[in-house]
Image (cartoon, rainbow, N blue to C red):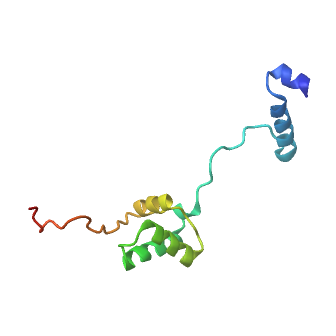
Amino acid sequence: MKEVAARFLIGRSTVLKLVHQCHETGSVAPLKVGARALPIWTDEATHEIVRHMVAENNDRTLAEYCDLLEEQSGVRISISQMCKLLFQLKLFRKKKPRGRPKSIAKK
């Protein structure tokens, strides 16, 4: 192993990984890198559940939508994923007015 690593100017651990990969896959070609795409981005059943949740009450928080989706489908996603999914489906939430109403004049 040392001789092979020295000859190709790579570490011994790299040689061991390549040998193991060759035994497992039959190839030393680079493996695919990156995360798998989550099924929520393409699953129409999940999209319908989310559309129904928003149509039913579009004043919920993203965390509440995540909880509801988990209850109804068994799929748990993060708040940021829910935000991206709503954007992908072109579903917009109603925003509650915050602060002082405009009708109240400052004195």
User: With 25 as the anchor, is 64 left or right in this view?
Assistant: left
Count all numbered tags in the image, as a single digit.
0
**Where does residue 19 sit, x and y in percent of width and height?**
86, 37
- Whether residue 42 can be seen here: no
Residue for point 24% across, 64% down = 99
**Where does residue 92 sit, x and y in percent of width and height?**
35, 65
Position of 1 relative to 67 (above/below)? above
User: With 48 as the anchor, is 3 left or right in this view?
Assistant: right
- Front position in the image: 88 or 100: 100
- Whether residue 72 can be seen here: yes
Position of 17 relative to 105 (above/below)? above
**Where does residue 72 sit, x and y in percent of width and height?**
54, 78
- Front position in the image: 12 or 89: 12
As drawn, the residue found furthest toward the front would be 107
For the C terminus, which image quadrant?
A: bottom left
**Where does residue 90 sit, x and y in percent of width and height?**
37, 63
User: With 3 as the anchor, is 10 left or right in this view?
Assistant: left
Position of 30 relative to 87 (above/below)? above
Among the 4 quarters of the image, the one containing residue 16? top right
For the N terminus, which image quadrant?
A: top right
Residue for point 72% across, 38% down = 30
Residue for point 42% across, 64% down = 86
